[in-house]
C-alpha cells in the first residue's frame, strides 16, 4: 500500500502544513472543508509538494524530517 507525505500552503494564513496519508484526495478535501481542526482556519489549502512512499513508517519518518527542517527550507533545498 502506498502512502503520501505532503506539504500544503495557505495563502490566507501564509503558513505551511505538513502531513501524511494513505488517501491524498480525501485528506486534502478534509483540510479544505474544515474537518481538520489544525487547518480549519487556513482554507483553502493548496498542495505545493507531495511524494509517494511505500510504507506508513517511511511516510512518518519523512514527515518528521520535513517538520524538523521546516517546510519552506525543505522546499528550497529541493530546488538546489
Image (cartoon, grey):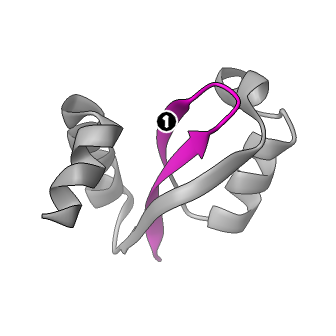
Q: Nearer the viewer, residue 9 or 5?
A: 9
Which residue is found at the position 21% from the left and 62% from the top?
78
Residue at x-position 71% and y-position 66%? 25
Apparent side of residue 6 relative to residue 60 in the rendered image (left or right)? right
Task: Give the residue furthest to the left.
Answer: 80
Which portion, as a residue range, is magenta?
Answer: 1-19
Q: Nearer the viewer, residue 45 or 39?
A: 45
Within the image, what quadrant is residue 64 found in? top left
Q: In percent of the image, x 23 and y 51: which residue is there?
A: 76
Q: Quadrant of the C terminus?
A: bottom left
Question: Could you tell me residue 9's position as x and y percent?
Answer: 56, 43
Name the residue at the right extreme. Answer: 33
Residue 20 at what x, y percent from top left?
48, 51
Picture quadrant where residue 36 is located: top right
Crowd class of label 1 (few under 14; some 14 to 19; many from 20; radius 10 Å): some
Q: Is residue 26 magenta?
A: no
Residue, x 56% and y 63% (percent of image)? Answer: 22
* Coordinates of residue 55 in the picture (x, y in percent): 35, 66
Secondary structure mostly seen in the magenta stretch: strand
Number of marks present in the image shown: 1
Instruction: Reply yes or no: does residue 5 show up in magenta.
Output: yes
Pick the front one: 42 or 62? 42
- Tell me: residue 48, above or below residue 31: below
Q: Secondary structure at mark 1?
A: strand
Left or right: where 58 falls relative to 40: left
Q: To which residue does mark 1 refer?
A: 16
Amino acid at each position: 500500500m502506498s502512502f503520501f507525505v505532503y506539504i500544503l500552503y495557505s495563502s490566507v494564513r501564509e503558513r505551511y502544513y505538513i502531513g501524511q496519508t494513505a488517501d491524498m484526495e480525501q485528506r486534502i478535501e478534509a483540510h479544505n472543508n474544515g474537518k481538520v481542526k489544525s487547518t480549519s482556519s487556513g482554507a483553502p489549502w493548496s498542495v505545493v509538494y507531495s511524494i509517494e512512499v511505500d510504507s506508513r513508517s517511511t511516510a512518518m519518518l519523512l514527515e518528521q524530517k520535513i517538520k524538523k527542517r521546516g517546510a519552506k527550507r525543505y522546499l528550497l533545498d529541493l530546488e538546489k
